[in-house]
Image: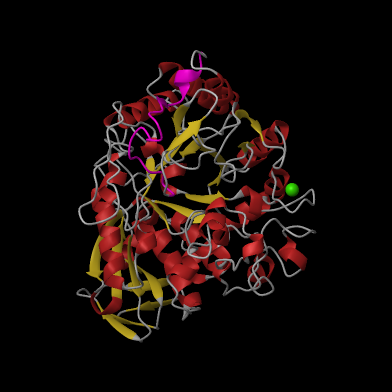
Amino acid sequence: MDEIQNEWVWWKHGVIYHIYPLSFNDTNNDGKGDLRGIIEKLNYFETLGIDAIWLSPIFQSPMADCGYDISDYYSIDPVFGNLNEFKELLQKAHARNIMVILDMVLNHTSVNHPWFIASRSDKMNPKRNWFIWEPASGKRKPNNWKTAFGGSCWEYDKTTSEYYLHSFFKEQPDLNWRNKEVRNEMFKMLSYWLEMGVDGFRFDVINYIVKDKKLRNNPFLYGIFSLRKIKTRNRPKSYKIIRSLRKLMDKYPDKMSVGEIYTLPPGDPKLTASYLLKGNNSLQLTFDFSIFFVRWNARKYFRTIEKWQNSIPEKGWPSNVFSNHDLFRAFNRRGIGRNQEQKARLMALLLLTIKGTAFIYYGEEIGMKNGNIPKSRIQDPLGKKFWPFFKGRDRARTPMQWENSSFAGFSVTEPWLPVNNDYQNVNVENQLSDPDSLLNLYRQLIHLRRSYPALHSGSWIPVCKGKNGILAYFRKSEFVQFLIVLNFTSKKKQYFYNFKPFFKLIFSTFPFPAKSYMEDFIWLQPFEGVIIQLHEEGELKNSNIHHSICYFPYY
Ligand SMILES: [Ca+2]
């Protein structure tokens, strides 16, 4: 795992930008983002320096769960555009060396999918066993399984007087992956997109894909009104199916798969990493969400990161993600309302220098915050159902803030979700012109990461594990070593090294003059993070690394 790879592998060493298409850029003035809007912003991705974009689902869908309920895996939903526009996006992104990853929902379809319509029509229909049906026994549900959102997994369907299984909303019936016909049909569909040139998939809730064959009850958690969902997810057969998914993808060069391993807080890095298996016969990447649930504290952050890094199998590779479309925006989560801007800068440094593929959620790079959505504007069915106890996932899905004009340049009309009211200050246009902005900090870090193998593939060696609010680690390659030091506290800190080499401060989350030092300590401002390059003077000349970036913090 600590072997340095000199060859650049886009999905391993690069940065992947997650787009929520409905909220990215609207070009046909219906208040909803579209594919043309993403094509329009290809320059922006280049400016940012990212290597790939992944799009939350764009397939045809009645949008009962914002596109995570697909009614045709081969069509683009008209809200987003059409297949030709998707092909244009693919071709134009590739022309700029930007890969395109699709969000693929394999666990379930929409109730409107023709397969389900056929399946529910008649017990004898050839598609009946494509979904999971159980006979009704009076009013009793077939077992005690609960959906991810609460309530029974079983929905009574009066046409045939049986229950069907749904792990999420009732509009999302679970496919029966034990049925070979289903597997073949889905593999055929994935091949279609791979043949077209799609560079990989993000597999939605992939650990749910298989359920207990005998439909045995989930056991109760002792003393808690909750169930251990051992019969409904992470079944042994899931791993087998994932191996065949990987086999299919390996028929095409340079493809990538990243799995969403759905777990409850505080996350489960060991489980998440188990889907990486031995690295070459499973998913290339999986998302672990533990860090989403950690309070702002250097020691806690360190432990969480270490646990995740240590869980990765020898041939596996970590990925790191701090924000997504289902949870809160990182900017708010770490808040408690104070020093958010400095903390966001520190987080960017952490995300882009810990070992693993970095995922950025749209708007994270400019410090977008959770939206404050009034009840009348809630779109997420979860928010509608659980208001006011849970206001839903819309708050992390507000329109991208491009500029200081009406609707933040996202659209010329009222968007599907309200624009955050800080858009006049927090927007791409402002930040591009401000050398000290968060956006330019992301750009600079992405550039540094690409420039130095130590930063994208070097070993990760922790040296300060949160003591006194300081987190510090090395990233090392053969010729270059970096020491990254992050001050999690609101106090100025002096950080001492146990070595005294010649070293150079090449990056700080604060504006700084590039400078070389001989001291054996460094001062860190409150919430400051730095990258220090360590080297013997003579070695630099032979290392064949361009250092121009070190002297010009902004470019
Ligand atoms: Ca639109």
Assess whether residue 139 is covered by the magenta stretch. yes
Task: Give the camera-side residue of 282 and 390.
Answer: 390
Q: Confirm whether residue 508 shows in the render.
A: no
**Colour scheme used in the picture?**
secondary structure
Q: In x, y percent, where is residue 155? A: 47, 35
The secondary structure that most of the magenta stretch takes on is: loop
Q: Quadrant of residue 427?
A: bottom right
Residue projecting furthest to the front: 138
Quadrant of the drawing holding the N terminus? top left
Q: Position of residue 242 (x, y in %)?
A: 36, 30
Residue 317 lies, in percent from the top left, at 33, 44
Q: Quadrant of the C terminus?
A: bottom right
Q: Residue furthest bottom?
A: 492
Closest to the observer: 51 or 465?
465
Q: Which residues fall within the magenta stretch?
A: 126-149
Q: Is residue 549 above or below residue 318?
A: below
In x, y percent, where is residue 170? 51, 39
Q: Is residue 470 left or right of residue 434?
A: left
Q: Up-down: is 40 above or below 106?
A: below
Q: Which residue corresponds to the image point at 44% horizontal and 27% vertical from the top-left?
A: 249
* Front residue of 344 and 216: 216
Q: What residue do we see at 72% from left, 32% from top?
A: 84
User: Visible in this render: residue 445?
Assistant: yes
At horizontal 73% and vertical 52% (from top left) the residue drawn is: 26
Q: Is residue 192 left or right of residue 539?
A: right
